[in-house]
Image (cartoon, grey):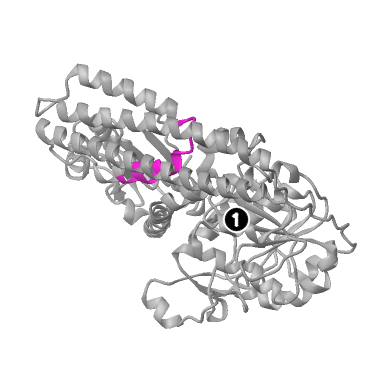
């Protein structure tokens, strides 16, 4: 299928090969398109990169690239004009794209945070599609920046998340899985986030408070409590100790705490009600482990990099009724970072932020608003959540400020309340939390057993390091050593699945995958040195991670010992 407003001519070269002319521009050489494509690939091919080819045409450049394709190389084809039918394990085709929005989600999926990518623009495609190409480059830049933010978060917090998971096990064995909350309500739910626009919604929120279920996203709790509004649920995913500051000085009598296992564990101590645990998508590999430890079914709650994402998916999990967002600005509304009374609220200098990389996006009210790439990443996560939701017709955005979140029905908060919040929600008294010594002692036994598994993992990693150093060749590993490495790796993988180690391994794998990409024109010796260093780095860093998790497990055991001793005084 060819889009309207494009004139396409097929021309036969002297060699008998076809070429194309679109709106007067040749997409391939009119003399020898095969030789032209070979030169383009020779100049642009980078081993270990994701290559993004903008423009397929008749496929000459892609065919030349496929001849060069090696190992884990990946190719993404963007073709805005024609349908492309090409099936290959390492090729992703995004063709006949109507507009840039249709490209956003598949492109985000195609490029992971460990990928380095290189763009190849086929001849004259940037002239035939000037605006689309410009928008495509901006989309790639935005994706790259958001991916970098996500990568930095994983690298910075990965070890903290691992420790938090281990320490939160003490609470999870006494709490309930969020499975207990599935479809608990059919009434309206309001999700309050801490953006600057929240302040103007608090009066309406107070008026209709008894007619809704209220969820607070993380630090938003301060802005609510300061106005005498106590939510039904507050959710935390934040792993840093700084987040404890939001909770330590407030008193909540009727609020239930919902937390992912990477949340900072001391926060749990601030709640005397029965609380609920879940896993985030990045913790998917721990689902079986958590179920074993708690003797409950563990649930993965969809989300992204913000508490607000999880608050929305929690609302969808809780109720079959209407849901709306307030305070979800995702922008510096009124030159503020947060709502009043939020412990993080700051004033920002608009001009200074624009000079340092701030960006303007479409606003809730149709204007342009100031945001940045972390907020942009959050906005796009909301848009992905709603795009795949079967419940989008009952989800609204009542922020009345900040950035426009595409896919959400916009409805003023007072209008939402007048339409849906017209009866009192039957209050359910939160259950007090358990203090089950028996469950804690069972956990103690499980942790002690797991430490023995960690010690076995250390022996395998140390054995692999010795095998690599033992190899005598400078260009290849011996078959016997490769065989033994594979055996140890397989045993390590099987044992690791029984443990909570995977959170520590993720940042290590990201680092090793990104920092040891093959270089152009590597000889056998260079390749061997790179792979040897890569694997030694991998095993040594994994060994450190095992040492760390053993330390965390022992800290938990000591805490359990103190808890048990105090319980028997």
* Above or below 391: residue 409: below
The image shows residue 534 at horizontal and vertical percentages of: 23, 38
Q: Residue 483 versus residue 134: which sits nearer the camera?
A: 483
Q: Nearer the viewer, residue 443 or 389?
A: 443
x and y, in percent, of residue 501 in the image: 44, 38
Q: Is residue 394 magenta?
A: no
State the residue at coordinates (29%, 51%).
124
Residue hosting label 1: 309
Location of residue 561 (image quadrant): top right
Q: Which residues are magenta?
A: 496-511
Residue 344: image location, x then y, percent: 54, 74
Reply above or below: 149 against 247: above
Residue 137: x, y in percent? 36, 57
At a point 26% along the width and 27% down the height, the residue shown is 463
Residue at the spot 73% in from the left edge and 51% down from the top edge: 433
Res 352 → quadrant: bottom left
Helix or strand or loop: what does disc 1 sit on? helix
Give the vertical position of 567 relative to 343 (above or below): above
The furthest residue to the front: 569
- Residue 266 in which image quadrant: bottom right
Q: Residue at x 72, y 48 (%)?
A: 434
- Is residue 82 shown to the viewer in this render? no
């Amino acid at each position: 299928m060819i889009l309207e407003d494009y004139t396409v001519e097929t021309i036969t070269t002297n060699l008998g090969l076809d070429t194309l002319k679109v709106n007067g521009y040749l997409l391939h050489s009119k003399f020898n398109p095969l030789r032209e494509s070979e030169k383009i690939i020779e100049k642009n091919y980078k081993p270990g990169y994701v290559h993004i080819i903008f423009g397929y045409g008749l496929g000459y450049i892609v065919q030349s690239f496929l001849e060069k394709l090696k190992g884990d190389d990946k190719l993404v084809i963007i073709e805005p004009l024609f349908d492309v039918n090409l099936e290959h394990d390492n090729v992703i085709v995004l063709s006949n794209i109507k507009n840039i929005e249709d490209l956003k989600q598949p492109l985000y999926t195609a490029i992971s945070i460990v990928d380095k990518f290189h763009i190849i623009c086929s001849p004259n495609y940037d002239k035939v599609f000037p605006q689309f190409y410009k928008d495509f480059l901006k989309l790639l830049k935005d994706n790259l920046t958001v991916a970098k933010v996500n990568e930095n978060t994983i690298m910075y917090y990965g070890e903290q998340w691992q420790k938090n998971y281990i320490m939160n096990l003490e609470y999870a064995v006494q709490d309930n899985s969020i499975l207990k909350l599935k479809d608990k309500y059919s009434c309206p739910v309001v999700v309050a986030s801490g953006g600057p626009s929240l302040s103007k919604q608090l009066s309406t929120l107070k008026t209709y408070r008894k007619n809704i279920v209220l969820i607070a996203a993380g630090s938003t709790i301060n802005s609510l409590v300061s106005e005498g509004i106590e939510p039904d649920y507050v959710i935390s995913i934040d792993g840093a100790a700084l987040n404890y500051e939001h909770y330590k000085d407030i008193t909540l009598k009727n609020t239930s705490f919902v937390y992912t296992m990477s949340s900072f564990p001391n926060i749990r101590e601030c709640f005397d009600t029965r609380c609920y645990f879940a896993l985030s998508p990045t913790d998917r590999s721990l689902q079986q482990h958590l179920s074993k430890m708690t003797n409950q079914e563990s649930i993965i709650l969809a989300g992204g990099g913000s508490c607000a994402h999880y608050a929305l998916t929690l609302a969808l999990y809780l109720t079959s009724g209407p849901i709306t967002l307030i305070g979800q600005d995702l922008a510096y509304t009124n030159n503020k970072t947060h709502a009043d009374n939020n412990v993080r609220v700051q004033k920002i200098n608009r001009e200074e932020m624009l000079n340092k990389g701030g960006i303007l996006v479409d606003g809730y009210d149709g204007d342009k608003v100031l945001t940045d790439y972390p907020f942009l990443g959050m906005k796009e996560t909301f848009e992905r959540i709603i795009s795949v939701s079967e419940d989008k017709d009952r989800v609204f955005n009542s922020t009345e400020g900040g950035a426009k979140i595409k896919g959400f029905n916009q409805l003023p908060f007072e209008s939402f309340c007048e339409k849906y919040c017209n009866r009192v929600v039957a209050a359910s008294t939160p259950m007090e939390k358990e203090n089950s010594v028996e469950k804690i002692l069972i956990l103690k036994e499980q942790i002690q057993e797991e430490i023995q598994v960690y010690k076995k993992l250390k022996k395998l990693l140390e054995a692999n390091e010795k095998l690599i150093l033992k190899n005598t060749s400078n260009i290849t590993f011996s078959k016997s050593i490769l065989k033994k490495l594979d055996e140890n790796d397989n045993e390590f993988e099987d044992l690791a699945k029984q443990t909570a180690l995977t959170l520590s391994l993720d940042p290590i794998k990201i680092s090793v995958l990104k920092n040891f990409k093959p270089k152009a024109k590597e000889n056998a010796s260079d390749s061997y040195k790179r792979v040897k260093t890569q694997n030694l780095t991998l095993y040594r860093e994994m060994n450190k991670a095992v040492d760390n998790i053993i330390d965390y497990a022992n800290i938990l055991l000591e805490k359990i010992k103190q808890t048990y001793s105090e319980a028997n005084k």
